[in-house]
Image: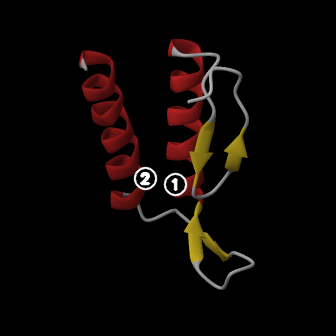
Amino acid sequence: MSFAVRLAGRAGQRSAQGFFSDDWHSRLKEDGTEATEIDVAVEELVRKEVSRQVPDDGIFGEEGGSTSGSSGR
């Protein structure tokens, strides 16, 4: 649980730093919704840290899609 809380805090900090700056851009995804470079960066952070913590688990993300795992989770 402490891993998830720490990671959520880091992701929130990265998100806040990005969105409170005036220098960010977005793009339209294939489905017509918007994704900012901050959205992508936060998801990359979470994916990287989750992969370190539970390397055999799969990951499903809004921006990066799914990554298969071998744990069945």
Q: Residue furthest front?
A: 72
Taking the spot 40% from the left edge, 41% from the top edge, the residue there is 14
Specify the quadrant that holds the N terminus.
Answer: top left
Q: Position of residue 52 (x, y in %)?
A: 57, 14
Which corner quadrant holds the C terminus?
Answer: top right
Q: Position of residue 46 (x, y in %)?
A: 50, 34
Looking at this view, is 25 or 9 the one in front? 9
Identify which residue, 22 or 42, lies in the foreground. 42
In this picture, residue 51 sits left or right of residue 23? right
- For the residues labelled 1 and 2, the Cα–Cα distance comes to 6 Å
Secondary structure found at label 2: helix
Q: Is residue 64 above or below residue 67?
A: below
Q: Secondary structure at mark 1?
A: helix
Type of amino acid under label 1:
Ile
Q: Residues within 10 Å of mark 2 (few under 14, many from 20)?
A: some
Q: Are marks 1 and 2 in contact (CB under 8 Å)?
A: yes
Image location (x, y in percent) of residue 5: 25, 27
Residue type at mark 2: give it: Gly
Q: Which residue is mark 1?
A: 38
Q: Earlier in the sequence, mark 1 or mark 2?
A: 2
* Residue holding disc 2: 18
Q: Residues within 10 Å of mark 1 (few under 14, many from 20)?
A: some
